[in-house]
Amino acid sequence: MKNLIPIIAGITLCAFLTESTQAQNTPTSVLAASILKDSQLDTVQGRALQLLTGLSAGTSYGEVWIRDFNTFINGSLQVLPRDTIKEMLLLFFKMQGNDGNISDGVIKKEKANVGYQYRYSDLAPEWAAHKNTVETDQESSLIQAVNKYVVATGDRSLLFLALSDKTILQRMEWALEYLLKDRWSSKYGLITGATTVDWGDVQPETGWGVAINEKTKWAIDIYDNAMFVIAIQDFLSMKPADYQTTRNWKQVAAGIRKNVRKYLWDPAAQKYIPHLYLNDSPFSPSFNEKEILYTGGSACAVLAGFHSKAEIAIINKQMIQAASKEKFATIGITVYPPYPAQEYPNMHPYVYQNAGDWTWFGGRMIQALIKNGFITEAVDELKPMTDRVIAHQGFFEWYDVKTGTPKGSGNFRGEAGVLLDAITLLKKWAVNNRK
């Protein structure tokens, strides 16, 4: 696996910035006009809105997952009644655990027949919920989704609704506190979770990979910490000035930013290490996990504001280089190179999150590029994703980078949501920059 990722070896930061500058030499008004004339963007946008009239994750899923819902709520708010979205957000708070934790998915009680450990609530007697305990993003995802609802609708009344003895504002803060109590490393000052592939939800060892068990190896990664900081930022943007918080959350976020830089960012390679282990690693001593590029967590780190424009250019270049290794890959390729089968028996190479291609996260990097002024790059790197939607006449969970074949769930709303948001941002930029 050595040298499979050409991380900037022999290429200087100056060279990266020169390439970026050259790419940006297209006149702004010309680029803006080409975006607004791109009928393919209109087609993908229209198809996404048609799909987002439902709230389950996709054809293969009966549940509404909060990590998915968070990524398509903006589109859902355009095509569904506001109260429908509001009630779904409230449902996740109604199913909140007695320690503040947030469930992963909710489903009608009569359909709760998978192998999860379900929870129930008198506040929502017709529903069941469950939590993929290897993840550490449910609390962060719900808070981010609430913020998107408030920003899109201007409806702040949701924040002050009371469920039992707590308002939604208090419940959001309770969820943040849960992470600091149950998923916190005081040694490193960072959020913890089970070892998974980047943002994934499956442990390496064979068996029921979504639940913590005696095989679990606890670790720290960039995805969980970036998502947590975004959630803190969103919470602080929503709370009234006179709301008394349980702690100084701005200080907590600043500490995480500092410790991410200290413990997770590799300055020589200009990339994130995959994991910082609290005890043992699940992998063999001869396996060099640090060579693997984590694209999804890196995209979330950019969205969290952890990087300068120079670093974003390098991170993006690394994603392009990783994608170039496989014929049908985009920057949504989850990791590169994949974990070997002997190291990750629960998920073989090029399957699912182990180097499958997920627009669900690649689309977030497109959003990050647009927000940071990398418009030409965003246009170029978005195109293979929208081409894929057109070619396959729909949205799919992930794609095989060897064959280009759609895999997993059809009608995957996560892909539709991130592409819709990216196209919306791109068109907004174009409108503001045309002649």
Image (cartoon, rainbow, N blue to C red):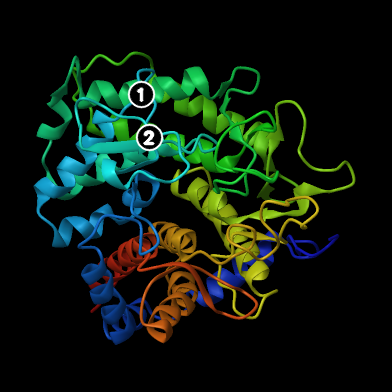
- Determine which residue is flagged by label 1: 97
Q: Secondary structure at mark 1?
A: loop
Which quarter shows the C terminus? bottom left
- Residue 134 lies in what quarter of the image? top right
Q: Earlier in the sequence, mark 2 or mark 1?
A: 1
Q: Residue furthest right?
A: 286
The residue under the point 28% across, 81% down is 43
Q: Is residue 119 above or below residue 18?
A: above
Q: Is residue 121 above or below residue 314?
A: above
The picture places residue 269, in percent across and down from the top left corner, at 74, 51
Q: Amino acid at mark 1?
A: Gly
The residue under the point 90% across, 46% down is 286
Quick one: 197 or 385, which is closer to the camera? Answer: 197
- Residue 44 lies in what quarter of the image? bottom left
Does residue 324 appear in this view? Answer: yes
- Determine which residue is flagged by label 2: 103
Does residue 150 appear in this view? Answer: no
The residue under the point 69% across, 45% down is 204
The picture places residue 257, in percent across and down from the top left corner, at 53, 33
Q: Is residue 261 left or right of residue 169?
A: right
Which quarter shows the N terminus? bottom right
Q: Mark 2 packing: few (<14 Cα in 10 Å), some, or many (20+)? A: many
Total tally of numbered discs in the picture: 2
Q: Secondary structure at mark 2?
A: loop
The picture places residue 304, in percent across and down from the top left corner, at 45, 43
